[in-house]
Image (cartoon, rainbow, N blue to C red):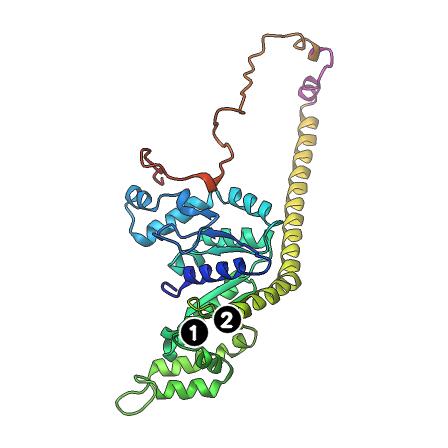
């Protein structure tokens, strides 16, 4: 969620990897177009490609709509980003993506799904869901976070790590206890203010959270949790141990499923092509039977094809693309920085 400390967490794990012996600098991507300053230096920054404020002005959008549109525009160039990342994959151990501050913009938009699927289909991918621990002490807030984590896990279908951030302010022991001890959560829920009405009877919200805690009990059993302090660095080592374990899970469970999906898709496309070709050949055979004279006239005569071989006046323009830019030229997004003296006008939809 917004304010959970995602960017600070990225800065901490980036610093941790730099401090290793030998250092293992990660490759960092910033996907938040609205952030004013980042506590780390990203290798690829969406702000170098898309000007968030100009997008808001051009499309007459608010903050969230501006972030979503900027992310959609950046996704149209993500194949170039992926090419760069894949080239760097042989020289770095970790590639980190810092997502936009508004979680729903990335997790529920088409561009977010495209980016996630594109990365996951090329490299071992792990999702880290960062939680603001001090703000999760209330049972209702805790349950809300768990429901969101559950929905993202089943939407991405990727290895998932629940990162309880800001443990220097409040340890995450209570959350782990609630996840593994149903009765402990029930006791916390009963003692929390607002869970009973004036007559001492449980409220509707209390009953709902009781039911949801039972439903999520199976979800908790297969969930990896880590407590981290982005300020002090506590728990970062344990986080990377969980990442390594999740990579093994990716290769064991996600990758075979991805390969099966690819094979099924290719098989389906092959069957469609074969069916289309079969229909075409049948139609062509029927046409030849009905119009034998036309079919004979369509036959190619090799002697007729030599008439144009000596024609040197063909209108052919050879374009030398080695010096000047051309439409569709490869653009290194890491070097694209907005210039103040150039306007940026995105085409309006429709």
The residue at the far left in this view is 198
Decide: is 121 above or below 321.
below
Residue 240's spot in the image, x, y percent?
56, 65
Q: Tell me where residue 141 sits by quadrant.
A: bottom left
Label disc, if present, on residue 235 of the rendered structure: 2
Q: Classify residue 123 as left or right of residue 132.
A: right
Taking the magenta stretch, the answer to whether it contains residue 8 is no
Label 1: how many residues lie within 10 Å, few (<14), some (14-19) or many (20+)?
Answer: many
Decide: is 334 above or below 150.
above
Nearest the eye: 99 or 148: 99
Q: Tell me where residue 105 sits by quadrant.
A: bottom left
Nearest the eye: 92 or 181: 92
Task: State how many labels appear.
Answer: 2
Q: Which residues are magenta?
A: 292-304
Could you tell me which secondary element the residue under label 1 belongs to?
loop
Label disc, if present, on residue 167 of the rendered structure: 1
The residue at the far bottom in this view is 199
Give whichever of discs 2 and 1 has the lower sequence position.
1
Decide: is 67 above or below 196.
above
| Circles 2 and 1 in contact, beta carbons < 8 Å | yes
Q: Residue at x 46, y 82 (%)?
A: 178
Q: Classify residue 258 as left or right of residue 117.
A: right
Residue 3's spot in the image, x, y percent?
36, 64
Label disc, if present, on residue 264 of the rendered structure: none
Residue 79's spot in the image, x, y percent?
53, 43
Residue 142's spot in the image, x, y percent?
40, 75
Q: Tell me where residue 343 sits by quadrant.
A: top left
Label 2: how many residues lie within 10 Å, few (<14), some (14-19) or many (20+)?
Answer: some
């Amino acid at each position: 969620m917004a304010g959970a400390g995602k960017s600070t967490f990225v800065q901490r794990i980036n610093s941790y990897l730099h401090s290793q012996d030998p250092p293992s600098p990660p490759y960092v991507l910033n996907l938040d177009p609205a952030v004013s300053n980042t506590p780390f230096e990203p290798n690829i920054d969406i702000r170098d490609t898309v000007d968030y404020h100009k997008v808001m002005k051009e499309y007459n959008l608010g903050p969230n709509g501006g972030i979503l549109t900027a992310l959609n525009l950046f996704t149209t160039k993500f194949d170039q980003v992926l090419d760069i990342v894949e080239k760097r994959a042989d020289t770095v151990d970790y590639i980190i993506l810092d997502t936009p501050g508004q979680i729903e913009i990335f997790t529920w938009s088409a561009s977010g799904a495209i980016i996630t699927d594109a990365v996951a289909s090329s490299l071992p991918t792990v999702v880290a869901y960062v939680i603001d621990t001090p703000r999760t002490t209330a049972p209702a807030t805790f349950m809300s976070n768990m429901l969101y984590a559950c929905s993202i896990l089943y939407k991405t279908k990727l290895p998932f790590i629940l990162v309880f951030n800001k443990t220097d302010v409040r340890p995450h022991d209570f959350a782990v206890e609630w996840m593994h001890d149903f009765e402990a959560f029930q006791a916390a829920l009963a003692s929390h203010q607002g869970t009973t009405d004036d007559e001492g009877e449980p409220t509707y919200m209390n009953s709902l959270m009781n039911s949801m805690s039972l439903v999520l009990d199976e979800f908790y059993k297969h969930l990896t949790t880590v407590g981290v302090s982005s300020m002090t660095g506590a728990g970062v080592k344990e986080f990377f141990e969980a990442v390594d374990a999740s990579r093994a899970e990716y290769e064991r469970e996600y990758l075979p499923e991805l390969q099966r999906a690819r094979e099924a898709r290719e098989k389906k496309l092959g069957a469609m092509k074969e069916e289309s070709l079969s229909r075409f050949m049948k139609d062509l055979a029927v046409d030849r039977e009905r119009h034998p004279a036309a079919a004979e006239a369509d036959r190619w005569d090799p002697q007729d094809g030599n008439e144009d071989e000596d024609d040197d006046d063909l209108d052919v323009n050879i374009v030398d693309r080695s010096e000047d830019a051309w439409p569709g030229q490869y653009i290194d997004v890491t070097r694209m920085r907005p210039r103040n003296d150039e306007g940026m006008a995105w085409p309006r939809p429709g």
